[in-house]
Amino acid sequence: MVARDVGICGIGVVSAYGWGREFLWEGLASGKPAASVVPELGGFPGDTVWAARVGAGGDPLDGPTRFARAMRAAAREAIEDAGGRGWQPGRRVGLLHAVVLGEVDLWRDFYVTRGGELPVRDYLGLMPSTPMSTFMQEYGFHGPAMNVSAMCASGNAGMITAKAWLDAGIVDDVVFVATDLSLTPENVAHFVRLGVAIADAEPLDVCRPFQQGSRGFVMGEASVAFVLSRRASRPYAVTLGGAMSHDAYHVTSIDPRLEQVFACFSDALDNAAVSPADVRYLNAHGPGTAQCDAAEAAVLERLFGPDTALYSVKPLTGHCQGAASAIETAVTAMGYDRGVIPAPPVVAPGHPALLDGLTPVADGLTVKSSLGMGGHNSAVVLAPPT
């Protein structure tokens, strides 16, 4: 790595495929979606609700909820993985946690069941700072610790913030975690009412990014963690740079002029000191909605060369909301390490640049884009380790 590169040195994943990054990889490689029918998310015709929901697991000592257990399980797996790949923590290890809706089950219970009555210790467990503090205590880390929130772009926002900390010399290493386990009946219902989530059909029947017949996405959950450092001998991939912007246009819709979207991609390439011709893959936000897919297809066609391929793993993982771009970054990093991209199968006529199923990795960079609801644009430039 050169001085500006930040290595992704360890990866931990809790997803609807299972508790551990190998479950994610095996699930993606199978080409089968992680979603299943989840009756407890009912409220729709026939209570047939498809969602990629994280199952029970983790250490009960980490807390009473899947959220608390998943966040710590993913972070521990990433730290253990990084240690096995030559990383040793420096004096100043920072912690970033990307979270949009945290501990929804506890807050729901607090207001609905308990009427606002809780022991003080349990009340502190609701605070977004508590998982950060207890994790820093567990490992004796003393760098800065804070939360990042930028809707569906939170994962990219965390990666860019981590690199900024490292570039500025504020930290020696960063543990970055993105957690979203927010699938309650109320949240699913509201995303369906917004017209972007589909809950009553199998994923590949409705979520077809950049293909005909796509109607939106199936909702998902995940907690994904990375150890980011310049001091590991065998990183999965390196982060070269990135950019974020905001449309300042609408609370849900993308500005149809796409000026800020294009500027964000261009700024990301400039920040990484690379050209569009260097980019071999666009790991797209690709939620399967008409406006997002059209925006990213336009960027691909106007900004990048004819050899840039396109894929989105949301048909398989579901849309993991605040953890979406993090789980998709893990796919790129593990793909570089294993020499294959686990793209979903193409099931309908689509964009000619779209990858179809397992694809050997070619030389070149990957741009991981994420367009968060409300105008949060982001792009991160990733490269294979040198």
Image (cartoon, rainbow, N blue to C red):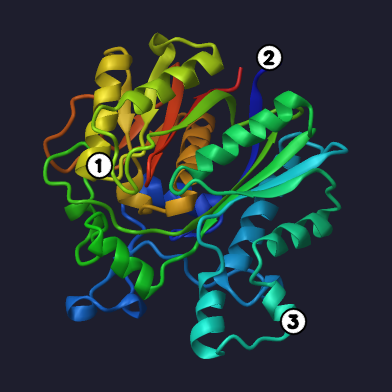
Residue 49 in the figure: left or right of residue 228: left
Mark 1 lies on residue: 345
Residue 358 vs residue 250, the one in the foreground: 250
Mark 2 lies on residue: 2
Mark 3 lies on residue: 120
Label 2 Cα crowd, 10 Å radius (few <14 / some 14-19 / many 20+):
few
Which residue occupies 56% across, 55% down?
Answer: 20
Q: How far apart are marks 2 and 3 (CA)?
A: 48 Å
The local secondary structure at tag 3 comes to helix
Q: What residue type is labelled 1?
A: Pro
Q: Which amino acid does label 3 sit on?
A: Val
**Residue 5 placement (x, y as % from top left):** 65, 21
Name the quadrant containing residue 347: top left
Q: Distance between the residues labelled 2 and 1?
A: 36 Å
> Comparing marks 2 and 3, which lies closer to the viewer?
3
Say which label, 1 or 3, has the lower sequence index. 3
Label 3 Cα crowd, 10 Å radius (few <14 / some 14-19 / many 20+):
few
